[in-house]
Image: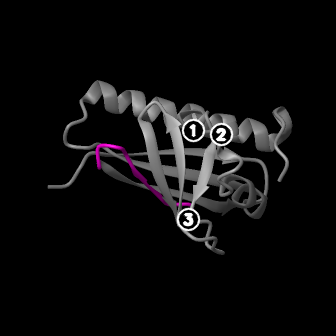
């Protein structure tokens, strides 16, 4: 069975390399990814964070030249979610795209909240990178 899919995209007026260099670093994510507000701690081949989902393990795609920032989140319950996340050049700027898949046990209302949450986080990333915050790339 396929899942309901939504993409959230935000255009950032910074070059794609700068956006990727900043957004792909786990150390910067708590500054813009509100679900990781407590920060990320390295733990071998993954990172650990505490947040709204409890303590989670996050496995990031290795650094690459393609703008791919995919990551897999494994909750304490064992629920595993793959998150497709990309930075693509867009003229002199970039577009960041996050793809959400509605899990079988997720209601329409909850999925809508997830979409809004991702949009808020990507808007914060945009603000930081466009000089409205304290981002240093």
Query: Mark 2 sits on what residue?
Result: 30
Is 7 left or right of 23, judged from the image as shown? Answer: left
Q: In this view, does 21 lie above or below 62?
A: above
Q: What is the C-alpha distance between the residues marked 3 and 2? A: 19 Å
Residue stretch in magenta: 69-78
Q: What is the C-alpha distance between the residues marked 1 and 2? A: 5 Å
Residue 94, position in %: x, y?
Answer: 69, 55
Residue 136, position in %: x, y?
Answer: 85, 48
At x 37%, y 29%, the residue is 112
Relative to the observer, which residue lies in front, 28 or 15?
28
At x 69%, y 60%, the residue is 20
The reply to whether dot 1 and dot 2 touch (C-beta < 8 Å) is yes
Give SS at disc 1. Answer: helix
Which quarter of the image is occupied by the N terminus? bottom left
Q: Is residue 45 above or below residue 39?
A: below
For residue 36, which numbered disc appears in the image?
A: 1
């Amino acid at each position: 069975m396929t899942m309901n899919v939504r993409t959230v995209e935000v255009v950032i007026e910074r070059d794609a390399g700068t956006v990727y260099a900043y957004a792909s670093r786990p150390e910067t994510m708590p500054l813009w990814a509100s679900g990781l507000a407590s920060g990320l701690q390295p733990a071998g081949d993954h990172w650990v964070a505490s947040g709204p989902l409890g303590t989670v393990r996050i496995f990031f795609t290795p650094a690459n030249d393609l703008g791919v920032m995919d990551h897999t989140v494994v909750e304490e319950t064992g629920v595993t979610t793959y998150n497709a996340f990309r930075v693509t050049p867009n003229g002199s700027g970039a577009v960041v795209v996050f793809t959400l898949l509605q899990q079988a046990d997720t209601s329409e209302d909850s999925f809508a909240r997830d979409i809004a949450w991702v949009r808020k986080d990507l808007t914060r990333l945009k603000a930081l990178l466009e000089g409205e915050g304290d981002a240093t790339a």
